[in-house]
């Protein structure tokens, strides 16, 4: 591996069991190990339902993670963690930029976050604002405020009218042919058309 690819920062969506385990491991190191969070608060039942995990890679090494949860009309960013050795090099910035881009591409118009009071200035630098008229609240020993980030829906946002083959590609990788595009190389099986079944 040359120096450029060793240092290159990229962000991917966890789409396999080993990548989900990787995301959980990085969170374990940060939150259980470093911040001494209780296990059942960190692994809160929201990792496998309507959630995506983004992984930041420095070359071939996973160095940071962020969880996105998908609600009907907003996405929520949470569980941001970067390994101590790789902090203050913009890993989180890359993760958040990808989280915002990915959410917008999925058609979301807003992203919600819960920010610890002492991190609000940092999240402002990512384009978030504190939600007006909403009180602060407590959990896991800290006080939080709600923060939000509006999104511009891109022209190629995924909708019901998107190319049906694009919709069934690996999530987030909608612009490259996926396994079902490649399935078209096989000869189609004989089928009766709906009008013949009536
Ligand atoms: C919070 C956290 C995710 C930030 O990750 P990161 O990759 O270090 O984030 P960034 O590099 O984008 O920026 C972090 C800080 O480094 C600064 N920074 C970024 N690049 C820098 C550089 N090249 N030189 C100097 N400082 C830099 C940023 O301005 C920011 O400063 P601040 O903390 O004083 O506001 C990481 O510190 C972490 O995992 N902490 C433990 C878990 C946690 O608290 N998570 C957040 C709660 S959900």
Image (spheres, grey):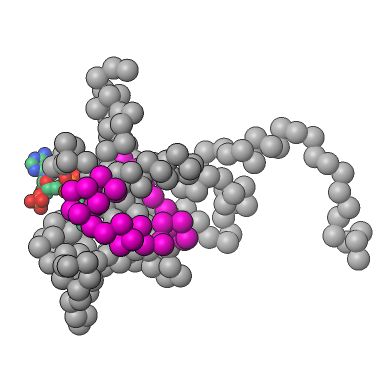
From this viewpoint, is residue 150 visible?
A: no
Left or right side of 55 for 183:
right
Report the quarter where the C terminus lies: bottom right
Name the residue rendered at 50%, 48% in the picture: 171
- What percent of the width, then of the height, locates residue 139? 22, 70
Query: What residue range appears in magenta?
Result: 27-56
Left or right side of 27 for 160:
right
- What percent of the width, then of the height, locates residue 106? 45, 57
Name the residue rendered at 42%, 53% in the picture: 52
Magenta segment includes 49: yes
Foreground pick, 35 / 22:
35
Name the residue rendered at 24%, 27% in the picture: 7
Foreground pick, 149 / 145:
145
| 157 relative to 117, above or below | above
- What percent of the width, then of the height, locates residue 70? 43, 63
Name the residue rendered at 15%, 71% in the picture: 143
Magenta segment includes 149: no
Residue 130, by quadrant, is bottom left
From this viewpoint, is residue 128 visible?
A: yes
| 168 relative to 128, above or below | above
Left or right side of 81 for 75:
right
- What percent of the width, then of the height, locates residue 4? 26, 22
Report the quarter where the N terminus lies: top left
């Amino acid at each position: 591996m040359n120096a450029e690819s060793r240092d290159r920062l990229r962000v991917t969506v966890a789409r396999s069991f080993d990548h989900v385990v990787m995301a959980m491991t990085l969170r374990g190191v940060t939150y259980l190990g470093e911040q001494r969070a209780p296990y059942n608060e960190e692994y809160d039942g929201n990792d496998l339902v309507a959630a995506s995990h983004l992984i930041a890679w420095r070359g071939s090494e996973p160095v940071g993670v962020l969880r996105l949860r998908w609600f009907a009309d907003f996405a929520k960013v949470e569980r941001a963690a970067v390994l101590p050795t790789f902090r203050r090099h913009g890993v989180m910035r890359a993760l958040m930029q990808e989280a915002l881009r990915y959410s917008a591409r999925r058609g979301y118009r807003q992203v919600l976050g819960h920010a610890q009071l002492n991190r609000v200035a940092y999240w402002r630098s990512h384009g978030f604002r504190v939600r007006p008229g909403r009180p602060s609240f407590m959990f896991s020993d800290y006080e939080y405020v709600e923060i939000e980030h509006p999104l511009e829906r891109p022209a190629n946002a995924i909708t019901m009218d998107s190319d049906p083959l694009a919709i069934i590609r690996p999530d987030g990788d909608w612009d490259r042919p996926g396994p079902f595009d490649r399935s078209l190389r096989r000869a189609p099986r004989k089928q009766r058309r709906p009008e013949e079944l009536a």
